[in-house]
Amino acid sequence: MSGAGLRYLVFLGSVRASGPPYPERLGLRVARACLGWLDAGADRAALVDPLDLQWPSAFKPHFAYRAADMPADLGELARQIAAADGYVMVSPEYNHSMSPALAHLLNHFGSSLFGFKPSAIVTYSAGQWGGARAAVGMRTFLAELGCLPVSAMVHVPRAHEVFDEDGRVREAAREAEWSGYFGRAFGQLEWWAAAARAGRAAQDPSAVSPAFRRDVAARNAPGGGDAP
Ligand SMILES: Cc1cc2nc3c(=O)[nH]c(=O)nc-3n(C[C@H](O)[C@H](O)[C@H](O)COP(=O)(O)O)c2cc1C
C-alpha cells in the first residue's frame, strides 16, 4: 500500500502564554518533533497552532455558520481538515485529562470532516508520566470524532529534557530510540491513512453513514425519545 501523496495535520493542544509553570509552552517542541518525523523533508505535514487562529470566542461550531458569515480562519481550517488524510493530536496532560484547548479546538468541527481517517495520539508532560492518563480519554474523544486512533500511542515524559525547542532529540545517542518509538505510531498512521484513502475512493462514506446535520437526536436509538 503506497503512502505517496498523503497529507497530515499536527494539532498542538496548548494555548499557554509565557510564564510559569516552567518550561513554557512545552508542546511546541513535541509538535515540531512530530512534523520532522512525519515530513521527512517531503512537505507532508502541517502544524495547527491554536494561537495562530482567530474567530469569535463565543462557541459556535463550524457547521453552525452560514458560508457568508464564516470566520476566515475557521473556514480555512475546516478545508485543511477535510483535505488531510490523517491527524496527529499532540496534547499535554492537564489535571489527568487531555488539554481543554485541544478539546475546544476540535469541538468546532464535525465528524464529517475527520471521519473515515486515522489519528495518532501523542501526549507529553513536564513530569514523569508523559501524559498517559490524558491519552486514555483521548481515545474516546477521537473515536467519537470519527478519526479512529491507531493502537500505538506516544507518551513523552519530561519533554523539555527529551527535545530542544526545535523539536530535535537532545541526546544524540537516544535519537534512534525516539525515532523508532514515534515511528511505530506514525507507521500505523501511514498504513491506515493509505488504506482509508483507498477505501474512500472505492466507496463514498456518506453513502453508508450520512452526516448529522442539525438534529442531535439523529444519533438516538429507535424509540429512544426526543431528548438528545
Ligand atoms: C492547569 C495545569 C494542570 C496540569 N496537570 C498536570 C497533570 O495532571 N499531569 C502532569 O503530568 N502534568 C500536569 N501539568 C504540567 C504540564 O505537564 C506542564 O505544565 C506542561 O508544560 C504543559 O504543557 P504546555 O506547556 O505545552 O501547555 C499541568 C499544568 C497545568 C498548567
Image: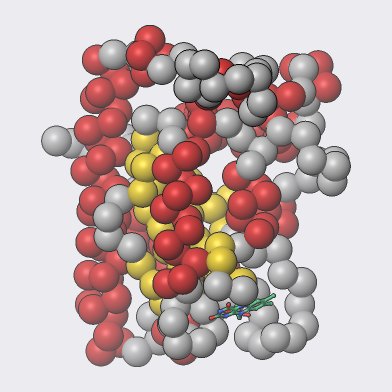
Furthest-top residue in this view: 207
The answer to whether residue 140 is left or right of residue 50 is left
Where 195 sits versus 181, above or below? above
Q: Residue at x 37, y 42 (%)?
A: 148
Furthest-left residue in this view: 1
Q: Nearer the viewer, residue 13 or 107?
A: 107
Is residue 44 in sight in this rendering? no
Q: Position of residue 123 (x, y in %)?
A: 46, 68
Q: How is the image coloured?
A: secondary structure
Locate the C terminus and report the quarter of the image it occupies: top right
| Picture mark count | 0
Q: Position of residue 14 (x, y in %)?
A: 64, 64
Q: Position of residue 16 (x, y in %)?
A: 72, 69
Where 223 sits versus 88, above or below? above
Q: Nearer the viewer, residue 183 or 208?
A: 208
Q: Position of residue 130 (x, y in %)?
A: 44, 78
Q: Residue at x 37, y 53 (%)?
A: 120
Is residue 16 in sight in this rendering? yes
The answer to whether residue 2 is left or right of residue 170 is left
Q: Nearer the viewer, residue 91 or 186?
A: 91
Locate the N terminus and report the quarter of the image it occupies: top left
Where 192 sits versus 82, above or below? below
Q: Residue at x 47, y 39 (%)?
A: 144
Q: Residue at x 61, y 35 (%)?
A: 109
Q: Quadrant of ligand 1?
A: bottom right
